[in-house]
Amino acid sequence: MDVAVRASAAAATAEDAGHGRATARRRPRVGVVKFASCDGCQLTILDVEDHLLEIAERFDIVEFAEATSRRSSGPFDVLLVEGSISTPEQAVEIARLRAEAKLLVVIGACATAGGIQALRTAAEHEAFRAAVYPVPAYVDSLATARPVADFVQVDAELRGCPISPEQLVELLVSLTTGRRPQLPDQAVCLECKRRGIPCVVVARGLPCLGPVTRTGCGAICPAFGRGCYGCFGPRENANTAGYAQALVTGDAAAGADGRGRDPVDVGRLFAGFTGATQPFRSVTDSLAGRPPVTLRPTLASPPETLRAGPPTWGPAPSAPEAPSAAAAKEAPDGPRQ
Ligand code: SF4
Ligand code: SF4
């Protein structure tokens, strides 16, 4: 059954067993959860302004820590999942949530492609941990940050960093009406043409990932005179190898001297928000390779407070006792008014 039709069925009208009459429609129970992420996609949900009240009317939002203190561990008719799976605990938790959700929708580049944190896959995990944390042994992270679909079955995805508010509304409407969501798989270039945005490759000789990236952002970077960073990930059947070659030879985005780009720079261009996806990753691996640098530890030795062991929560400090009336009278400034 189609993803949207299943969602509609999940909230379908209940039949009165005795008389066969339809009773009130139950609002779908919706949860929003996060794993390794910056919360930007959750903020986009709160940012749909004109539609927010309508969404709250049509869906029973039972879990959304960013927005409400109401909590639920399931079950959910629809579960929106932000963030990549980066720790052993998260791998266990996503499996539990999958069992609680009729429909699981991943939102954003972190959840759909691993996100910017997946770039650690390009170097040694231990070297990165030592470079970032004073005491890496306290950090229990997986060697890679990976998309949710690598761990559990995913029913639908919204791409982007952050997601598009329009695509979010489109998905929610399709879920309530039982139709397939209309999420285009066109290149960002088409958005430039529709909006009359001058091409930065042609007009300014800047490298841009638009020809191989799925649209959804409205070509916001080219609109501000910058090349596309590939936030929405590779579009289906994108010829990433051919486009990378054109950047290297200078057939696309040649520099002022008419020559192509440094292959290492081209490889790194593909190593962004969705750089861990196979079509982008293969370009980075072939042109830039793994960073040859040795990462330096953040600190020569951990600070005194950390050397003794992991921080622990001690007993709460007791509140200072209120001064007695007699002691207050004796104080040089007298009692406070
Ligand atoms: S996809 Fe981007 S905006 Fe969304 S949580 Fe990840 S880093 Fe933040
Ligand atoms: S600016 Fe980038 S996305 Fe826009 S038309 Fe040029 S290559 Fe395509």
Image (tube, helix red, strand yellow):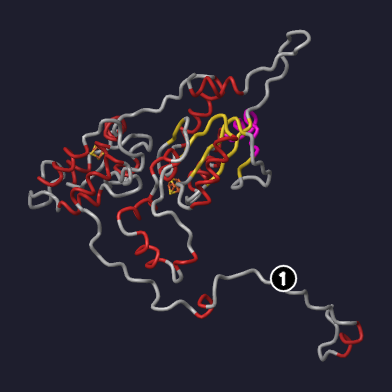
116 versus 149 height, above or below: below
Q: Which residues are magenta?
A: 52-62
The residue at label 1 has a CB less than 8 Å from ligand 1: no
The amino acid beneath tag 1 is Ala
Judge the density around disc 1: few (<14), some (14-19), many (≥20) Cα neighbours within 10 Å. few
| x and y percentages locating residue 18 in the rendered image | 78, 10
Q: Label 1: which residue?
A: 316
**x, y (%) of residue 115?**
39, 47
Q: Residue at x 30, y 54 (%)?
A: 122
Q: Position of residue 273 (x, y in %)?
A: 35, 47
Q: In this orientation, which residue lies closer to the viewer: 84 or 206?
A: 84
Asked which quadrant contains residue 282, the reply is top left
265 vs 302, left or right, is left
The residue located at (89%, 82%) in the rendering is 324
Residue 61 versus residue 336 in the image, above or below:
above
Above or below — where is 257 with respect to 10?
below
Residue 59 lies in the magenta-colored region: yes
Residue 129 drawn at (x, y percent): 40, 64
Residue at 48 percent across and 62 percent down: it is 139
